[in-house]
Image (cartoon, helix red, strand yellow):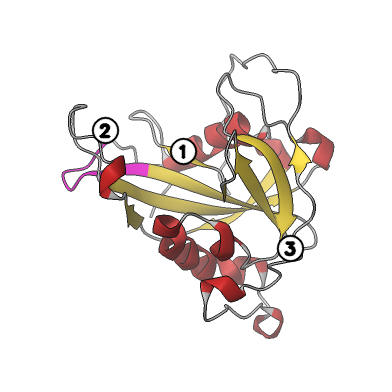
Amino acid sequence: MPVGSTRYATLIDPEGFRPNVGIILSNEQRRLFWGRRIGQNAWQFPQGGIRADETPLQAMYRELEEEVGLCPHQVTVLGCTQGWLRYRLPRRFIRRRCGPTCIGQKQIWFMLRVDCGENAFCLDRSEKPEFDAWRWVRYWHPLREVVYFKRHVYAQALEELAPLLYPEHAQRPVRPTEPGETDGARHGESPKPGGRHRAPQMASQLRQRRR
């Protein structure tokens, strides 16, 4: 999918899915950024909707800055999924009286390498932060903790993007057979809290960088 050139004119498609991007950040040890949603005991990767005037790549850079505080020059895009990955929302989360009904998300997932130090991370860059803490975890650990209705999409994204982080197949971590038996389930680092002071919202838009 030409993520740098195709624009999406509608926010919810005819089937009821909202276009969205997911972001997997990796460090030099090939550990993954794992964020705790603010005020909740719930963990996930950064993600967010694609606006009507954005490409998936532009949306990814915007969400990256809003949720993690990183700019394009601080990461390298290793690749993305080749098609939409979809998940449905549980019925109790579907709002049927608020315009077009959204039944779930369809996502393009990006794998990024972090090229800066941890001090560059800023979880309160936007007015409504998504995370209040984060930590590095092993590759398959997210399948243990992500909310149940997103688990299959996480598995699909991690499976498809694994060769980008582990081009040498012999060293690639084996996907566990059960969600509760994930690789490194007890080896995530201690959570790193977000900043105490709200950073001013940046007025300039993220520049688009293609790789």
In the rendered image, the vertical position of residue 202 relative to residue 138, given as above or below: above
Residue 204, visible in the rendered structure: yes
> Relative to 106, is 154 on the left or the right?
right
x and y percent of residue 143 in the render? 54, 64
Specify start and end residues of the magenta stretch as a single range: 11-19
Between disc 1 and disc 2, whose residue precedes?
2
SS label for mark 1: strand
- Which image quadrant: the N terminus? bottom left
Mark number, residue 48: 1
Write the residue at 56% across / 47% down.
Answer: 42
x and y percent of residue 134 in the render? 70, 44
Q: Main secondary structure of the magenta part?
A: loop
Between disc 3 and disc 2, whose residue precedes?
2
**Residue 7 highlighted magenta (yes or no):** no
**Residue 13 highlighted magenta (yes or no):** yes
Q: Residues within 10 Å of mark 2 (few under 14, many from 20)?
A: few
